[in-house]
Image (tube, rainbow, N blue to C red):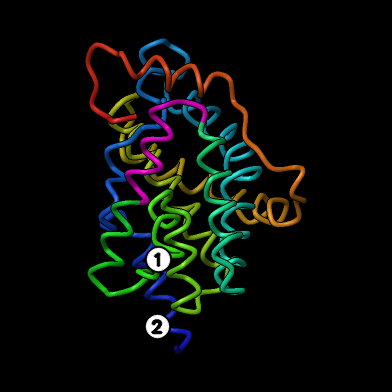
Amino acid sequence: MSHDLKLLRLLQLASPSLPVGGFTYSQGLEWAVEAGWVQGAEGFRNWQCQQIEDTLCHLDWPLLARLYQACLDDDAEAFARWSRFLLANRETAELRLEERQRGMALTRLLDGWQLGQAPEWRASLELSQLGGMAWLAVHWEIPLRDLALGHGYAWLEGAVMAGVKLVPFGQQAAQTLLRDLSEVLPQVLQTALALGDDQLGGGLPLLAIASARHETQYTRLFRS
């Protein structure tokens, strides 16, 4: 596959039009705003900075690398093990459900392309979006660093768009946040890819509390 085509495939994977329902989730932000924990664009910046350092750096990106390597090695057992580890680190029922729903949605897309249907892979692919992205990236020969940065930017863009609706702030502030927060992603990725297995795992108490409280929030725009 040519470099240009790999880039286009990466853009497709990172696009908000990817049918995994990313725009329907706020990952606890909706409750955090209602509780007054996140106020204004600066409050949102601080909230996301913590998630970049904890969730992206110590959980999502290192696991994406391991899922990617398992696909390269054609090791369905390792892929299943790391997929379950990821799910176990989602600290609330809502976050685990979101992970599964995203994974199942991406797997349905793979079904439409007649990909990823081998029995030893199928159940694990349904557990998380990260697994499906890793599987497709290997299939399309997208380099790991490019995949991780594309995933990170898509995650950040989804969070900012949720912030526009919930905090709220305008489009100028949204684009400034995207510009500034994305600057740290390459350095954070470097750290994430160097972590050993015993250094993996996320833990943000306020995120877990916000997600748990969101499950019974009276009015909700988002599913998490």
Q: Which structural element holds mark 2?
A: helix
Image-quadrant location for residue 34 = top left
What mark, if any, has residue 106 been given in the picture?
none
Q: x, y (%) of residue 222?
A: 27, 30
Relative to residue 80, is residue 194 drawn left or right? right
Of residues 205 and 139, which is closer to you in this image?
A: 139
Of labels 2 and 1, earlier in sequence is: 2
Relative to residue 125, is residue 59 drawn left or right? right
Number of callouts in the render?
2
Q: Pointer 2: residues within 10 angstroms few (<14), some, or many (20+)?
A: few
Can residue 102 be found in the magenta stretch? Answer: yes
Q: Please identify the quadrant where the N terminus is shown.
A: bottom left
Q: Which residue is mark 2?
A: 5
Q: Pointer 1: residues within 10 angstroms few (<14), some, or many (20+)?
A: few
Q: Which residues are magenta?
A: 91-103
Q: Amino acid at mark 2?
A: Leu
Of residues 51 and 169, which is closer to you in this image?
A: 51
Q: Amino acid at mark 1?
A: Pro
Of residues 187 and 192, which is closer to you in this image?
A: 192
What mark, if any, has residue 119 been given in the picture?
1
User: Who's the residue at 50% across and 79% down the image?
Assistant: 141
Relative to residue 66, is residue 179 drawn left or right? left
Q: Please identify the quadrant where the C terminus is shown.
A: top left
User: Who's the residue at 75% across and 42% down the image?
Assistant: 199
Can residue 27 be found in the magenta stretch? Answer: no
Q: Which structural element holds mark 1?
A: helix
Q: x, y (%) of residue 106?
A: 32, 57
